[in-house]
Image (cartoon, helix red, strand yellow):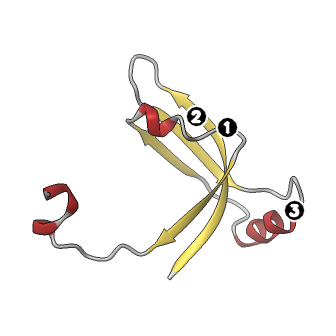
Amino acid sequence: MTVRAKFTCQVNLKEAGTQIATVVFSPVTTNPPTQENLTFWKATPSGQITLQIDNASAASQFEVGADYYVDFTAAQPIDEDTAIWNQ
């Protein structure tokens, strides 16, 4: 089962002297009051996701003020011997 949320990027700040960026998201609000935003806001009226990203190209994908869907899917156990990072 997957649960979808809609978050707004609030901060995208590169740390001085590093390539690490801190990116902060909060749930969408009712401004603008679209039907979609009202529906998501009712389900997740508060919260925060904070990421530290050590990849400048990846961090640059998140624009402050832009909305993003976040999909939560349960992670299944993996076989460490055949995991993608061992290929």
In this rendering, the answer to whether 76 lies above or below 80 is: below
Crowdedness near tag 3: few (<14), some (14–19) or many (≥20) residues, C-alpha within 10 Å: few
Residue at the spot of label 2: 12
Residue at the spot of label 3: 34
* Kind of element beneath mark 1: loop
Crowdedness near tag 2: few (<14), some (14–19) or many (≥20) residues, C-alpha within 10 Å: many
Tell whether 70 sits left or right of 27: left
Cα gap from disc 3 to disc 1, whole angstroms: 19 Å
Question: Tag 1: residue type?
Answer: Val
Q: Quadrant of residue 63?
A: top right
Question: Tag 2: residue type?
Answer: Asn
- Residue at 70% across, 45% down: 66
- Outermost front residue: 87
Residue at the spot of label 1: 64
In front of the other: label 2 or label 3? 3
Question: Tag 3: residue type?
Answer: Thr
Q: Position of residue 71 (x, y in %)?
A: 54, 67
